[in-house]
Image: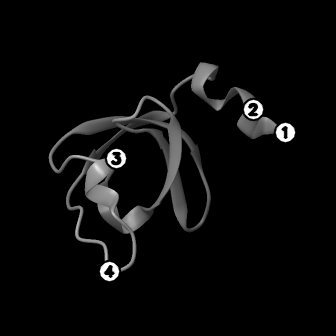
Amino acid sequence: MIHVNWSERKTIRNVECIHTNAKKYMVDRALTKGKTYELKNETDEFYFVIDNTGSVGGYYKDYFKG
């Protein structure tokens, strides 16, 4: 249940959003191109960052540089 306290965990590093061009989801509502986000957890396919809503969200790594 590591996801329960992700927002309070230490930031791993910061990653920059390089685009919000999603084919299936509306990513531009939660991410802003050019903005830097705190990386809280990482898997092979996803970054879990604190997004524009103030919550931790999981996004494909191809949206970020970092």
Q: Is residue 1 left or right of residue 11?
A: right
Between marks 1 and 2, how big is the CA–CA gap? 6 Å
N-term-proximal mark, 2 vs 4: 2
Q: Residue at x 24, y 62 (%)?
A: 20
Mark 3 vs 1: CB contact within 8 A? no
Residue wearing tag 2: 4
Which x, y percent locates residue 22?
30, 72
User: Helix, strand, or loop for circle 2?
Assistant: helix
User: Residue most toward the right?
Assistant: 1
N-term-proximal mark, 3 vs 1: 1
Residue wearing tag 1: 1
N-term-proximal mark, 1 vs 4: 1
Which x, y percent locates residue 37?
34, 36
Report the mark closest to the observer, 1 or 4: 4
Q: Is residue 18 left or right of residue 11?
A: left
Q: Residue at x 51, y 46 (%)?
A: 57
Between marks 2 and 4, how big is the CA–CA gap? 29 Å
Report the mark closest to the observer, 3 or 1: 3
Which x, y percent locates residue 3?
72, 39
Write down the quadrant of residue 38 in the picture.
Answer: top left
Residue wearing tag 4: 23
| Quadrant including the N terminus | top right
Residue wearing tag 3: 30
